[in-house]
């Protein structure tokens, strides 16, 4: 089949599937049928994506555009498909992780009511459609459209258990924060069009070389990235988003959707790179997020929250790498992170499925009950900690190397690497080592094949993906990585091992109270518990927004409308006063008519 | 001898005005109706003088005949039922006189300001012209009018009919 | 020849008298009579002006007016009868239900 | 028969047929009404198919002189703008007839008024002659009084505040109050419009009311335009919810029965905006340019103020009504930009908001019918029993906050783009702020109504939409998505007309250089 057709199918097929599972009641009411349909569709998408990846590797490049909106008889906005070295790997990542997650969900959510499951898979298909449309975008405008649609899917899937008030709040919060970032994104899009008259990737690349964009425009665009990829201070929605089912967290809030921000940075790297100042700001925000989120993760007790902050932190790495000019490092880390973080989430889901609790202190000793899960989670931990041989080692090393020229950032990056190893090690040790600390943990059981199968595949990828750094660089045309063991690599490795060691030391079976927060992290714990950022948002919503709304609502009812009503009152009272004139007797009315007639005639006579 | 044709007109006009005055001032309603009938007949005379014989005929037949008879019926009917005579309301007379006089004054002022014109002598039969008007130019209104008259009759019957009849 | 304005003056007089009647009569029938007078005045005008134009339009309108007046009288009388039956009176002052 | 005349006449004829029907013919009444609406809708679609997009301009013109001595004629034609607006009216009327299925008392009279009103709306959108335009306008506005006064609902409003002693007598929140307020304020607007139209007529030498003919022979000095334009702006603007003359809208829409709210917020408010642009701006270029800044500022206030007001409401219908005020602000903002994108956006927003708010009011009607409450705070967990309604409602919310993939996005985006490219770039900011606040309150309301635990025992017999109730909301939902993904269905024609009219206003051709794109 022609690449154009394949590309179109990759995007449209999931949408069709969503239509079938969502609109045909027969399918929607049979959740397993919908799930099977959806999984098969996304597997088909995966196959097509792989074919496309092969073709892109062979140097094929496809760009197709159709008009979306006109302006003055010409094209204003376009909708298009673009296959090149950058979009092809992302297509595969998205459909691969989506396929694994959907298959996993079939088992993980099998106890859900059939109706809800139909809805669940509809939203999943919709998400795959939106994400693929985002990846194949030919221009900023289309990317924005798909960008908001994935946000919508995130909202819908976080709110999957809508009857839970906390889920509802988390979903709405995610949407609001994303909408805030997207508002900035939208302004940036408009400013771009005002300046360059185009949103097309290639055209923009050519034009920014001639006239670079202002820092404001670039940073506004970056604000979209900040909300989507959970960069400080717009990260607040991501930890709350864990209210959704675990597979959703794996797909959207770890592997793919949150990575869309980084994808945007890579896709439009020339635009960002055209303004060095903005790029520096981006780097600092990224590295701060990495450190901040890693520190927060160290004191979390909910396994999903640990993973959420870890995602935040890793995204911070990627953003910082782009800020330092390392777009390849960022993109490569995005890819490997997608595999091992999805793996970690799915493994965490497996634990939760067995233990029926998210709390790490309530686990322990799971090694004896869930051997396969332990191995898989362990692979994930080693990968994210950056132990040689695992994919995370290669990609994280690339990232840290990019930061070498900025000493402070580099040091923070290394520190974060150590912290990452520590908190992931802590989570692993708390969950699997030692003795069971609750009934749930004591009666845990291994998950079925539908759940472990996808995890195994992801684990394999989490191990081997790192060896593809060079082919990846050739494919994407970003830069030659020239991978070699450097000082940075050795330092990172030492810190990672130190972190794992510390985790064993403080939280291992030998520790007095494995779940306690060690003394040196007490200030962090206190700060996290204070929740300053969340409280600031709470304040700006409750006091500023609702307060303003209340004031304006009052003004409208009693002042603006009050004045209108005052007219009405005057008319009423005036009418009452004039009422005596209306006698109701016909001759009186005739007389009034005559008086009017005489007046008119007199006026006519004098005037004419 | 331009004043000569004025003589019959002046006679007719003064008769007409006198009758009209009696219509509005007569105490007895029956008298009023009779005066009105007379007024209408005299008006027909005016039409004749204007060489509009057909209208004069209609005026006498339809108006003075039909309407006056109808009115008499009504007056007698209501009088018999109530057995009382409703007096004028004298308090409004001044007001009414002022109003009608000022209307008359203003109308007169307008009329006197007009350029003088005269009724054209009939070249053809005025009735024939009228017929053409009705059956050619105003055919549609003419037909509509007949519908209206039917509707009026039905309406009148509905309104005046006894509830239980 | 008699000038048209004379006819119009005559009509004006008759009209004003009718108006006087409408304003002074208390009896609904009396008011109806006065209205007839006014309508008659208008007809005189129509015919006189129609004659001066000489194309029969005025007369046609006068005829229409007569027919309409007849219709009006019929309805008016019906209302009088109805009023009389329902209220036992045809005094306009007692029919002042328009007073809010 | 002439297609446009058919569209205008079909609802009117249906109304006449319904009058002739016997009193108890429930099904027949609905059937006739839906047929009439369906003919209009089909006519609107046929018009779109017949319209030659490549040629553009006014097409299917028909002129029948009515009063030649005054230059009044029945002159109708369509351009790219009226195509979309005809379609909108057709869709909303058709959906509204379905949504009124459950009207119980005096349903015949209800349908008659509804259809007559719609005939007026269709008439306005196709009229070239300003006199007939005004006539249709009044036909569209006046039945509202009866529709709200007779079939409306009453919900008393507690009165506090500085003017309370005066306002106690007014029965605020009652349906009679709402009907009276709406009618009086709109009639006040009409008075201004009449002045404006007569001024235009006189400027054309009193020879014709036809806007196209007037354009050729109208001579109006700048000074005159400077006062005629605001008259038309305020006059038409009142119907479009222009601040501070918008206050009829929340009370009116809240009190009105479902189909009336749908038509009023969905279509009638657009008449106002359409009038401002088509008559006000296009006929008075210099006035429009001089007043653009004021129009834009007031529109910005509308957007933000309306959104905040909506956020402060507790009654679901009031929330939707205030959101209409906010969204109509977007239309006026687009109009004020005097740019191609802005105008395209304004007209498309009329369409998108019409569909969206129509869907909203239909849904609110359903929710109220089943739960007997409009108080958002007392609801919760409704998704349990009305999953279908909750999905369509969410879709409406998404369009309202301008999510890509819904018609609302296309419209708002174009307006914001136009705003930035206009002489006053900062206009974009209140627009985007408004969209953000909209996101806050619509999602808050959705969560409150449909999500969370279901309050057991408080609501009985809650159920999803059934049978005929589905027709209206599913139709509107499909339109929202269809035009969101494929805006060119309407936008190509709109763009064509925009280029033509905007060129008149700014004095030079705004068409893009180079070969035109063949649609």
Image (spheres, rainbow, N blue to C red):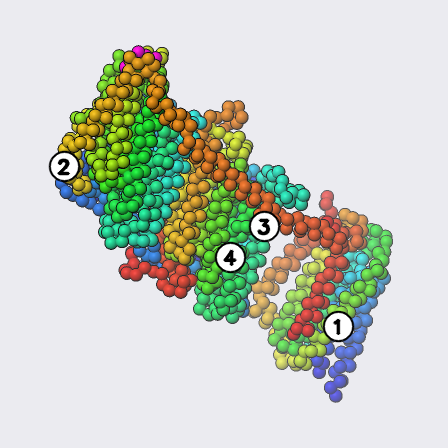
Does the magenta portion include A69?
no
What is the CA distance from the residue labelled 1 to the residue labelled 3? Answer: 42 Å
Between disc 3 and disc 2, the foreground one is 2
Whether the residues at callouts 3 and 2 have beta carbons within 8 Å, the answer is: no
Between disc 4 and disc 2, the foreground one is 2
Is residue A481 rendered to the left or right of residue A323?
left
Provide the chain ID for the residue under circle 2. Answer: A
Which residue reaches farthest bottom?
B1
Provide the chain ID for the residue under circle 3. Answer: D
Q: Which residue is mark 4?
A: D233
Residue A24 visible within the image: no
Residue at position x 67%, y 56% from top? B152
Tag on residue A482? 2
Q: From the top left corner, tell me how far across and down residue A586 is, in percent.
A: 75, 56
User: In the rendered image, which quarter contains the N terminus of chain A?
Assistant: top left
What is the CA distance from the residue labelled 3 to the residue labelled 4? Answer: 18 Å
* Secondary structure state at the residue bearing disc 2: loop
Same chain shared by disc 4 and disc 2: no
Q: Which residue is mark 1?
A: B105
The residues colored magenta run A432-437
Q: Nearer the viewer, residue D507 or D491?
A: D507
Q: From the top left corner, tell me how far across and down residue A207 is, in percent.
A: 25, 52
Residue at position x 29%, y 59% from top? D516
Whether the residues at callouts 3 and 4 have beta carbons within 8 Å, the answer is: no
Q: Which residue is mark 3?
A: D183
Q: Residues within 10 Å of mark 3 (few under 14, many from 20)?
A: many
Q: Main secondary structure of the magenta part?
A: loop
Is residue D367 rendered to the left or right of residue B85?
left
Between disc 1 and disc 4, the foreground one is 4
């Amino acid at each position: 089949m022609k690449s154009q057709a394949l590309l179109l199918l990759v995007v449209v097929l999931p949408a069709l599937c969503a239509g079938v599972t969502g609109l045909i009641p027969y399918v929607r009411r049979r959740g397993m049928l919908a799930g099977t349909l959806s999984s098969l569709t996304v597997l088909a998408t995966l196959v097509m994506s792989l074919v496309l990846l092969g073709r892109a590797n062979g140097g094929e490049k496809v760009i197709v555009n159709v008009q979306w909106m006109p302006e003055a008889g010409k094209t204003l906005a376009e909708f298009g498909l673009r296959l090149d070295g950058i979009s092809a790997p992302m297509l595969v990542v998205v459909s691969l992780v989506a396929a694994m997650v959907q298959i996993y969900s079939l088992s993980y959510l099998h106890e859900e009511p059939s109706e809800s499951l139909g809805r669940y898979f509809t939203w999943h298909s919709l998400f795959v459609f939106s994400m693929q449309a985002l990846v194949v975008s030919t221009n900023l405008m289309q990317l924005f459209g798909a960008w908001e649609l994935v946000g919508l899917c995130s909202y819908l899937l976080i709110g999957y258990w809508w009857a839970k008030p906390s889920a509802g709040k988390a979903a709405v919060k995610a949407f609001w924060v994303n909408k805030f970032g997207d508002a900035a994104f939208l302004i940036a899009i408009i400013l771009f069009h005002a300046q360059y008259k185009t949103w097309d990737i290639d055209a923009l690349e050519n034009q920014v070389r001639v006239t670079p964009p202002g820092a404001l425009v670039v940073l506004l665009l970056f604000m979209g990235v900040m909300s989507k990829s959970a960069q400080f201070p717009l990260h607040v929605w991501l930890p709350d988003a864990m209210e959704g089912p675990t597979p959703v967290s794996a797909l959207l809030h770890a592997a793919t959707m949150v990575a869309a921000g980084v994808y945007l940075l890579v896709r439009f790297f020339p635009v960002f790179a055209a303004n060095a100042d903005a790029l520096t700001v981006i780097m600092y925000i990224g590295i701060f997020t990495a450190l901040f989120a890693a520190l927060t993760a160290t004191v979390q007790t909910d396994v999903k929250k640990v993973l959420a902050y870890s995602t935040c932190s890793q995204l911070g790495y990627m953003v910082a790498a782009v800020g330092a000019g390392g777009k390849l490092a960022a993109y490569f880390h995005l890819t490997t992170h997608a595999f091992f973080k999805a793996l970690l989430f799915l493994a965490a889901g497996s634990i939760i499925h067995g233990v029926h609790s998210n709390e790490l202190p309530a686990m322990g000793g799971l090694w004896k009950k869930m051997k396969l899960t332990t191995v898989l989670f362990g692979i994930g931990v080693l990968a994210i900690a950056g132990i040689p041989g695992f994919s995370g080692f290669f990609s994280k090393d690339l990232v840290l190397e990019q930061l070498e020229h900025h000493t402070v950032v580099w040091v923070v990056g290394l520190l974060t690497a150590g912290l990452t190893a520590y908190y992931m090690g802590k989570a692993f040790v708390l969950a699997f080592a030692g003795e069971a600390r609750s009934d749930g943990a004591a009666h845990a059981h291994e998950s079925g094949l539908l759940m472990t199968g996808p995890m195994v595949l992801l684990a394999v990828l989490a191990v081997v993906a790192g060896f593809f750094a060079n082919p990846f660089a050739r494919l994407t045309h970003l830069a030659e990585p020239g991978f070699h063991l450097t000082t940075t690599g050795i330092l990172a490795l030492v810190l990672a091992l130190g972190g794992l060691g510390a985790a064993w030391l403080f939280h291992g079976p030998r520790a007095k109270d494995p779940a306690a927060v060690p003394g040196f992290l007490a200030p962090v714990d206190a700060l996290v518990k204070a929740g300053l950022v969340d409280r600031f948002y709470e304040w700006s919503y409750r006091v500023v927004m609702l307060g303003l709304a209340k004031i304006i609502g009052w003004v409208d009812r009693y002042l603006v409308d009050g004045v209108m009503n005052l007219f009405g009152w005057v008319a009423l009272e005036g009418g009452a006063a004039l009422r005596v004139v209306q006698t109701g007797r016909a001759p009186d009315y005739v007389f009034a008519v005559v008086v009017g007639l005489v007046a008119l005639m007199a006026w006519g006579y004098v005037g004419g | 001898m331009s004043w000569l044709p004025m003589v019959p007109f002046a006679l007719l006009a003064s008769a007409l005005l006198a009758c009209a005055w009696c219509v509005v001032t007569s105490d007895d309603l029956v008298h009023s109706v009779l005066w009105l009938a007379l007024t209408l007949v005299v008006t027909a005379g005016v039409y004749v003088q204007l060489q509009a014989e057909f209208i004069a005929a209609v005026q006498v037949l339809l108006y003075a005949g039909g309407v006056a008879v109808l009115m008499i019926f009504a007056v007698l009917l209501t009088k018999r039922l109530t057995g009382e005579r409703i007096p004028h309301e004298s308090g409004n007379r001044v007001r009414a006189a002022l109003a009608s006089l000022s209307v008359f004054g203003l109308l007169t002022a307008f009329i006197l300001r007009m350029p003088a014109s005269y009724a054209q002598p009939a070249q053809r039969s005025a009735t024939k012209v009228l017929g053409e008007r009705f059956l050619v130019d105003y055919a549609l209104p003419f037909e509509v009018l007949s519908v209206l008259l039917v509707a009026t009759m039905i309406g009148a019957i509905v309104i005046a009919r006894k509830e239980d009849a | 020849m008699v000038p048209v304005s004379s006819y119009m003056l005559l009509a004006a007089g008759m009209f004003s008298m009718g108006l006087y009647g409408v304003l002074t009569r208390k009896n609904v029938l009396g008011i109806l009579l006065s209205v007839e007078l006014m309508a008659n005045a208008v007809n005189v005008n129509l015919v006189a002006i129609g004659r001066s134009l000489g194309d029969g339009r005025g007369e046609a309108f006068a005829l229409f007016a007569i027919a309409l007046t007849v219709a009006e009288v019929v309805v008016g009388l019906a209302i009088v009868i109805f009023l009389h039956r329902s209220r036992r009176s045809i005094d306009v002052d007692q029919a002042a239900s328009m007073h809010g | 028969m002439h297609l446009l005349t058919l569209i205008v006449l079909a609802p009117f004829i249906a109304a006449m047929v319904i009058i002739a029907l016997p009193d108890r013919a429930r099904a027949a009444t609905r059937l006739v009404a839906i047929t009439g609406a369906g003919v209009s809708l089909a006519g609107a679609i046929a018009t779109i198919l017949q319209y030659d997009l490549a040629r553009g301009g006014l097409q299917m013109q028909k002129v029948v002189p009515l009063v030649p001595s005054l230059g009044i004629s029945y002159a109708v034609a369509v351009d790219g703008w009226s195509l979309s607006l005809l379609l909108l009216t057709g869709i909303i009327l058709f959906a509204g007839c379905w949504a009124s299925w459950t009207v119980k008392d005096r349903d015949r009279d209800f349908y008659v008024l509804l259809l007559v009103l719609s005939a007026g709306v269709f008439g306005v959108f196709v009229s070239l002659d300003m006199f007939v335009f005004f006539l249709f306008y009044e036909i569209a506005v006046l039945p509202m009084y009866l529709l709200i006064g007779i079939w409306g609902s009453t919900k008393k409003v507690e009165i506090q505040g500085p003017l309370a002693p005066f306002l106690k007598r007014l029965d605020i929140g009652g349906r009679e109050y709402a009907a009276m307020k709406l009618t009086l304020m709109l009639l006040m607007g009409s008075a201004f419009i009449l002045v404006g139209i007569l001024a235009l007529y006189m400027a054309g030498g009193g020879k014709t009311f036809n806007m196209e003919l007037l354009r050729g022979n109208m001579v109006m000095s700048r000074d005159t335009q400077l006062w005629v334009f605001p008259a038309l702006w305020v006059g038409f603007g009142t119907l479009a919810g222009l601040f501070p003359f918008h206050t009829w809208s929340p009370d009116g829409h809240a009190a009105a029965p479902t189909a009336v709210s749908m038509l009023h917020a969905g279509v009638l408010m657009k008449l106002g905006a359409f009038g401002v642009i088509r008559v006000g701006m296009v006929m008075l270029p210099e006035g429009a340019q001089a007043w653009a800044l004021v129009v834009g500022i007031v529109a910005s206030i509308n957007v933000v103020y309306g959104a905040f007001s909506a956020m402060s409401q507790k009654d679901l219908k009031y929330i939707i009504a205030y959101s209409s005020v906010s969204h109509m602000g977007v239309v006026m903002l687009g109009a004020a930009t005097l740019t191609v994108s802005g105008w395209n956006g304004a007209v498309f927003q009329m369409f998108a908001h019409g569909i969206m708010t129509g869907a909203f009011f239909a849904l609110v009607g359903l929710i109220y019918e089943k739960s007997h409450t409009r108080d958002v705070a007392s609801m919760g967990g409704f998704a349990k029993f009305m999953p279908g309604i909750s999905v369509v409602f969410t879709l409406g919310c998404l369009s309202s906050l301008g999510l890509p993939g819904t018609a609302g996005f296309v419209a708002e985006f174009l307006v914001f783009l136009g705003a930035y490219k206009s002489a006053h770039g900062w206009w974009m900011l209140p627009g985007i702020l408004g969209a953000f606040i909209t996101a806050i309150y619509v999602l808050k309301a959705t969560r409150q109504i449909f999500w969370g635990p279901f309050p057991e025992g408080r609501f009985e017999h809650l159920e999803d939409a059934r049978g005929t109730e589905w027709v209206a909301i599913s139709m509107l939902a499909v339109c929202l998505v269809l035009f969101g993904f494929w805006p060119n269905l309407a936008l190509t024609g709109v763009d064509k007309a925009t280029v033509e009219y905007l060129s008149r206003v700014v004095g030079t051709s705004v068409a893009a250089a180079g070969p035109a794109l063949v649609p």
